[in-house]
Each structure stands twice: as C-alpha cells, then as structure tokens.
Image (cartoon, rainbow, N blue to C red):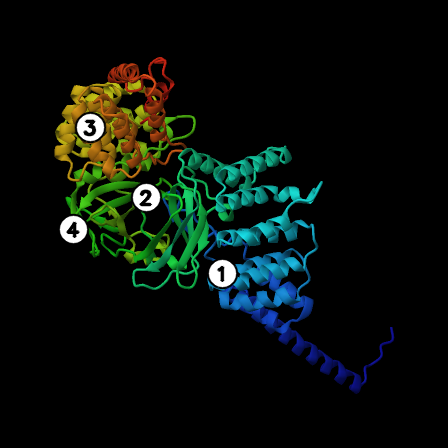
Amino acid sequence: MNQTKPSRKRLTLCIVFALIAATLLTVWLVSTFDRFQAFQTPEQKLLHAMEDIEQADGNSKAKLIEQTVIEPYAYTPYTFDVHLGASSMLRSGSTEDALLAPEERIPLLEWYMQNAEPNHYLIRAAEQLAYEYDVLGKNADADQALADAAARLSKNTAERRDLLLLQAERHLESGNTVQTRKLLEQAGPAKNDIVFNGLSETYGWLSSRLLFAEGQAKSALESAQQALAEQARIEKDGYTSESYIALEDYRSSLKTALKQHDSDPYVFSGKFVRGDGTPVTRAGIFLRESDRSQYRGDKEPYHAVTDDTGTFEIRGIVPGFYELEVGLSYEQLEDWSWPFNWDDRIEIKGNSTIERELTMTPLIDQQSPVGGQELTGDTVEFRWEKVDGAAYYELGGMIPNHDNSGGMGSMIRSGITDNHISLTLDELYGTSGGLTWSEDNDWESTQPNTLLAYMNPEAKFSWSVEAYDAEGNKIAQSSGPRIDSKSIEKRPEFYLKQRTLNPADRLVLKGELAQALDRYRSNVEADPNDTESLRLLTRLLYAKSQIGEDQTMQELIPLLERLSEHSTNPREIAKLLYLFYENTDWAKYEQYYRLYTESNPQPIDAYERSIHATVLLYQGKIDEARQEFSDALSDDGTHRFVGMALAAELTAHQPLTKVREMARSYPELSQENSWTYWSDLLEAMEKERSASPDTFDAQLDKTLTSFLNNRQADVKAKAPASSGLPSIDDFVEALAQVN
C-alpha cells in the first residue's frame, strides 16, 4: 500500500492546531471545574446564578429570574420555619437552601414586573414583591404592584381575578371597605361563569368578611352560608379546599358571636420586639380559633406580618377566644425564643381595640449537666443562668426514643425558686415518660425507653428549664428550635450511670415486655426490698391498665401501695390517686391525696386540685368542693372543670344569675375540638325558670342530686333520665362530659 509522507508545513499546522485544541480543552476543563466547584455549596451556586442574571438580558434574563428569584420562593408569606403558639410548633422549609436577601430580590422582581411577558410567573412576582414592600412599610407600592400586574392580564381569567381578590383582601385588612367592595365587584362572577368556580369560595369568604366589617353581622352569616352551599354544589367529588374550611370556621365564629349578642368588628395590634428593644421584622402574627389545631398557611383568616418597626395590625376580627401564634425564621430564633403559655387565650370583645407588645427573650444558658456528662453520684445537680424577674422555674427532661429519632418530654420539677436544684435518684427514677403504643392496642408496642425512663443507664437524656414571673407567665426558656446548633460540649445532655441494666431491663429494651413482666415479678418475690424491680413492675402493669386490661388493677394497686412504703415519690402516688378515683374508693383516695400533698415538693397543679374538688362534690362535701374549685379555677387558664364548679354552686342553692356570672368569668377554653358555653346553658335555665321558679328549683335540685349520687358510685355514670325541663337536661348532659 502506498503511503504519502506529510510535508513539513502540513505537519507544523497539525501541531499548532493540536496545541490550540489542547489549550481550549484546558480552558474549558478549568472553566467546567470552576463551575462545578461553584455548585458544591448552595451559597456558591446562588452566587453563580446571580452572575448569570447580571450578564443576561431580555427573555434570557427573565428565565433566569424565574428560576432563581421567583420559583424557590412560594408565595405563602405566612409560612415560616417555626410556628410558636398554644396549638402548634410546626417546622417547614429547609436550612440547607441559600436564599437571596430582600434587598437583592426586590430590584430583580421590579425588573421582571416591567419587562417579562404576562404569565403565571408574573403573578407570583407581583405577590412576592407586594410582600417585600409590605415588610418595608410601603403598602401603597405593594398595592400598585398588584394593580399593575392585574392590568397586564386578560379580563375574565382566573389569574387576573386571583390578583383582584388578593387586592381586595389587603384593602379589607387595612380597613378600606369601599375599595374592597369595588375590587370584589370586578372579581365577581359573570353569568354562567365556569372560570370563576375555582375562586368562588375565596370570593364568598371575603364577601362575608366585608359585610361583617361594615357592621352587618347577620348579612355576613347569610353570605357565608350561601357561599358554602354554592361551593358544596361545585365540589361534588368531596374535595374540600383550605378556603372552604376557613369559611366554615368563619361561619361558626359568626354564629357564636351573634348568639352571644356581641358581633362588632375588633382590632388587634401591637409591636414585636426583642428584649433589648430592637424590632422583630418579617415575623408572622396569627390569631387562631382555639379549638383548631391544623395550620392553614395564608388561608388563616387573621394574620399579619411585622414591618420594619416590628408593628402589626389585624382588623375585622369576630369576637371570641383566640390563641396567639407567631411565625419566625430559624435565624430569628438563634439564641432567642418567644416564651408563651400553652393555655394562653386572648378574649376578643366587639367594637374595641387591644394592643399587646410581644417580646422575644434570650435563651436561658444551661450550665450543668452538659456535654453528655456521665453522672454517678447519689444526686444530680442542675444549674442554669438566673433570669431577672423570675419567681420560679420549671425543670423538664427529654427521654429519647429507642432509636434516638426523637423523644418524649417529661416534667421533672416545678416551683423551683432558685437557679439550681439538687435532685435525688429516687425522684428521677420515679419520673416516667408518656406511654405510646400501636393502634391495635398491643401494650407490648409501648416505647421501651419511656418505660425504663431515667432508670436506663444507656440512654442520653436532655433537659430544659423555663422561667415564670409571679403571675405565672412564662418569661424565658432554655430550649429553642436551634438548640442542636450548640456545640457538643454545651448541649444539655447527660447519662445516669448509677445502675446497670439487669436481665429484665434488657428484655424491656428488646420490646419483650411480657417476659420482662414475669422477670420483674420473680425479682420482687425473691427480694422484697428490690425497689427498682418493684418500680418497673408497677410501670409495666400500669401500661397494661391504660389500654383497657382491667384485670391488672387487682395486682397493680397493692404493688403501688407497697412501693409508696419504700418511696414517697409523688408521681407514683399520683397513679394510686387515679386508680382509686376510677374505682370510686373515696376513703383510699383521700388517704393518699393527703400523702401526695405532704410528700410533693412542688405546688399541686390546678388539674389535680380540680379532680380533688370533683371528688369532694361527689361525696356531698359541697362547701369544701366550692372552695377547692374557686382556688383551682383561678390558676387554670383552660377552666376545663368549670362545669363541675357551677354544679357545686347550684347544689349550694346559689342564684342562677350569680352562677351565670361565674360562668362568664371562667369560660371553658380547653384544647379539645369543642367547648361548652356554660353561660348560654345557664341563660336558657334562667328563661325556663321564669315560668315557674319553685317547680324549676325543685327539679334542678332533684336532677343534680341524682347525677352526683350516680357519680359517687360510678365516675363514668351518664346523665340521669329526662327531668322534663330541657334546659336542666342540657346542663346535666354537658356536665356528664366534663373530665
């Protein structure tokens, strides 16, 4: 085969081209490597994206802004990393994302609003820009941004109407009812309007709220009912939107307010600051119906975001009782928290304004034990930073799950007047965790670590402390959502290494509870002084009893009484109180209640005092019961036993008008899904009594006596047969639900 020898010139060119290619390849590889490196962290990735946006123009720039500035930021300004309040402590979002600061986002959103083509991103950009303006106190600019975006969209489209409804809601919340009505008229449905169906519940909700803000509460209720009926007709597949649920709740609030003859709009405003006076900006403020536990984002009816001065205002609130909740970012909670009481409620009364200053306080510094310290002494010393204004502290602990995926909180000690306390092992060992088991009521599915609790030397426990003022308001706490950001050496964690696991303990940790129960029985029979086995034997039997295995009671009660002879730990005596209450053994209950109060180093809480008052009432000790209820109700923010307290007053033949005033002073505000409006029941009784006072009083006395006598024999006894007077029957039926 003939081969042609390449010329020198041709060879030289090949080499040159090869060198150029190699150089270009090297540059490309370096560039690619740099780009790859830039994507290794969220911060570098964001920086690179911002460089691309700066260099781009036209449609390319718009696309990059959509991807980097608009898409990652869902328009729910009322969703925060952490929600703190009586109903929830919800976390959302991710701390792994690198997000643009507001001053970086605003110019890009403004550019997009002016230059991008109308599409769904334009709507999101307008919503996000309006939010950013609001936080800066530029409400007029926010309104204009939404109006400009709506003007660029075609009429009769769902997108344009969505923006109009958002504008209407903003004007409603600012008190501009005239502009709200104009916007609702523009967003309202045309004849045979199919496009509008998806927005009808929002439209109905806002229309009802507008009527209420205008002072037309009855019309507002009718409007809400019509909107719900229309939406039910549209949503035939059973789907229920967030707006629909919000409207249902709103209707319920309106009905209650009208029934209470208090239906004027209400304003709640205030300021959110840190303890050093600096404002907390971009924080969410919520007023939520206290009987609702689910969070609904921007469909919450009463919400606001604090501006650059920390100021907020919520208008047009229906009178009632509400829980206050705040939304914060992780960064805002770094070393700070907003201390709140779980039973705190705000009473909204019509035609008035209330202001409240909310204050974030620094987390309490926990000094010892920390860093996973292994404790071996006979006592455990807890120590923390002293808090100015604190009248007392509460010490809590966290018992880890078996797989360390979480834990179960437990109250260790309350009423601590100093910033340190030394606890005996007996007190810690007697502190158990809450019981949880599977849905099929298999007691052996109970979390093993909560059974051993502080008697498990292999578990790493954590602890926390809360500070309260003289009125019982929480003013500071040690725990917060960012507590894990502490260095390992400073984390409030410890081990209790004073004992070693025995074979029965290891069976518990393996989940073999039946075998462990038998082993503990054998240990106690072999050694009557084996307090540890006796304690754990009663703990396993108590777990069985809680899922309905009543046959364990006969064995459990004598063992708990025996345990009380070795240890006067009040938590174990409390179990005896519960069992004697369930069995209506009043003599034993009173005996151990005295022992419980004598041995308890902390104040008896309002719930326990209310139970004791109920026991006194069942036994016919009316005056003692009335006094105990009076003391307990003033300390119980939920007033869950107010019905029993009212029954005690009626049994003592107190006038209905006086008893009704008591019901108004202590409204039931428990965290259950439904409450009893006792003042309404008593009002109905007053009306029915007016027809024949003597007959009514005799029947009321007879019915209450029958109910209390039945409860003396069986604490779960139902209400007696009908008295023939509906208001009395309704009252006693509600009384039977108190627990």
Q: Earlier in the sequence, mark 2 or mark 1?
A: 1
Q: Which residue lies furthest to the front in this view?
A: 691
Q: Residue furthest right?
A: 2
Q: Residue furthest bottom?
A: 9
Q: Earlier in the sequence, mark 4 or mark 1?
A: 1
In this rendering, the label closer to the viewer, 4 or 1? 1
Q: Which amino acid does label 2 sit on?
A: Asp
In this rendering, the label closer to the viewer, 4 or 2? 2
- Residue closer to the observer: 344 or 33: 344
Residue 134 badge: 1
**Cβ–Cβ below 8 Å for labels 2 and 1?**
no
Q: Name the residue under label 4.
A: 418
Q: Is residue 635 left or right of residue 96?
A: left
Q: What element carries label 3?
A: helix
The percent coordinates of residue 551 (x first, y second) are 29, 17
What distance separates the C-alpha of mark 3 from that of mark 1? 52 Å
The percent coordinates of residue 242 (x first, y second) are 54, 42
Dot 4 crowding, Cα within 10 Å, few <14, some 14–19, many 20+: some
Q: Mark 3 points at which residue?
A: 626
